[in-house]
Image: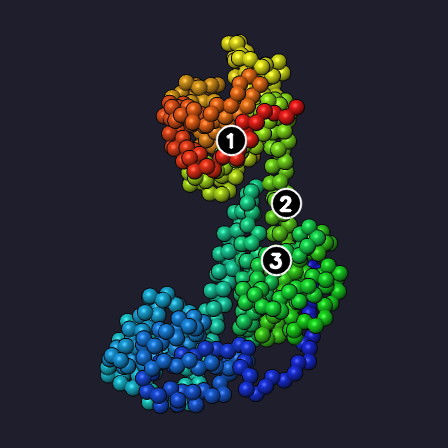
Amino acid sequence: MRIIKDAIQFEAERATPASPTAKPLYTWKLLVVDDEPDVRAVTRLGLRNFTFAERPLEFIEASSASEALQRLAEHPDIAVALVDVVMETEDAGLRLVEKIRNELGNKLIRLVIRTGQPGAAPERYVIDHYDIDDYKDKTELTTTRLYTTVRSALKSYRDLCAIDINRLGLERLLQAAPDIYRLANVSLQEFFSGVLTQVVGLCHLSPDSFISTIEGVIATVESGEQAVHAGTAPFIASGRFHAIHEQCRKAVLAGQDPTGLPGNAFIIPIVIHGQAEGYIYIEPTLPLSDDDKRLIRLTAQQSAQSLENLRLHIDLANAFRYAIDMLAEIAEFKDKTTGRHIERIATYTEKVALAMGCSRAEAEHMGISSRLHDVGKIGIPDDILGKPGKLDPEEVRIMQHHASIGGSILGHDKALGLARSIATSHHERWDGLGYPAGIRSAELPLAVRIVSVVDVFDALVSHRPYKTPWPLPEARAEILAGRDIQFDPQVVDAFLGLLDQGVFANMIAEASLPPEG
């Protein structure tokens, strides 16, 4: 596991100078809330040449608290608000602060109270009772003091954003972590989203090279194609993305420096066992410091290692499914009279589980495990399995052994625990009069209770050498008659609900057909 080259760092291309009237790509948004037009004009004048971290100010104005709320809705990324206290009411500015913090839940915006009537809103009282970041008397806000106030507020906003974005990235990674160690439904999308967010956050750690805005994408090579797993929404939606993506793809796979990319573009290839598996692409607004680059490379390296572990677990999950499929095919080959019965049971089981509120992952696991419900028939003599007529009592006793045989076959691997429970116990009953153990099925996993219902139903509506399919109304009535006696009543209700909606119509039609050959 390694990162090829150190990284591919591109020199800035010579760009045509921007028009003097062109709007800067990245700005700090400053909201000025004051009912006096002169105050708003003086504020703009005092900060007309202001820049911080090579980004100018973008002024947004409001003459009242209600108008300020509209501006905040239009610009959720406002960094600092200078808020007058007395506007449409004597405490309009303070009420605005409360709404921003409590109703809007905006904890990042820096709020500076400005008042021309200190007596109406005493400094100590306001600071103690309102979540503000600074308090200024308008008479003391000279150009220099205004500059200092806004710069300090922006620095705090920038640092809080860095902390918040790291928190979000860590949260995504932690959410994805359990999936890395689970043999099904691994969330690559969530995993890569967390990695990308962490990369953005790491760039914010260097105060000398703060990346105020970053556009990035993480991609991996899957089946010879480049599949995007995570990216910042504006970048992915932009017309630039596909051209840049294709250049990066060719460069990473060929180990060459791409051409024609924006200045300061930074690509970190992700390599597993010497094979390029993807890349991280970012566009910082300022050159990366050496510390930034080192941290990003370390993150990419750890991401590559995590990705390898993730894929190992995906391979294990696939191997698990292949093993189940193989055993199921063996059982079906042994008992050819069941035809596609095994596939139908898996579909029935998954759909009923979903209808009963199980998650998609749980339902899929139940469906996969149900495929082995009759694996024990491998140990039943062919003459009994293929008998065209009704079994005699001794043959019934032998046939019933398939449940115990199935449990024995599947009892050597914990990963097959649910499949073992289904194979062993799907003939147990709600009243405790089933086999092989004669226990109440209420004590068994939900998947077992679901298979108990759908296995009987599919047998009833299926064409077999020894019977013709039951008409649907009669099969439905038989399942309903077993409610609270043979079957879990809640499972019966969920199954019949889906049946009455026509969800199983195609499978029932398939089951009623005579087997080919």
Q: Residue at x 29, y 86 (%)?
A: 116
Instruction: Please state if 156 lies on the left or on the right of 219 as rendered.
Output: left
The residues tagged by marks 2 and 3 sit, at their Cα atoms, a distance apart of: 20 Å
Instruction: Please state if 393 lies on the left or on the right of 283 as rendered.
Output: left
Whether label 2 touches label 3, CB < 8 Å: no
Q: Nearer the viewer, mark 2 or mark 3?
A: 3
Q: Residue at x 73, y 54 (%)?
A: 274
The residue where tag 2 is placed is 312
Residue type highlighted by circle 1: Ile
Residue type highlighted by circle 3: Val
In the rendered view, tell whether residue 114 sits above or below residue 480: below
Residue type highlighted by circle 2: Leu
The residue where tag 3 is placed is 228
Q: Residue at x 55, y 45 (%)?
A: 185
Q: Looking at the image, which is closer to me, 456 or 131? A: 456
The residue where tag 1 is placed is 508
Is residue 48 in view? yes
At mark 3, the secondary structure is: strand
The residues tagged by marks 1 and 2 sit, at their Cα atoms, a distance apart of: 39 Å
Which image quadrant for residue 416?
Answer: top right
Is residue 443 in view? no
The residues tagged by marks 3 and 1 sit, at their Cα atoms, a distance apart of: 40 Å
Q: Residue at x 53, y 18 (%)?
A: 467
Q: Nearer the viewer, mark 1 or mark 2?
A: 1
Q: Residues within 10 Å of mark 3 (few under 14, many from 20)?
A: some
Q: Residues within 10 Å of mark 2 (few under 14, many from 20)?
A: some
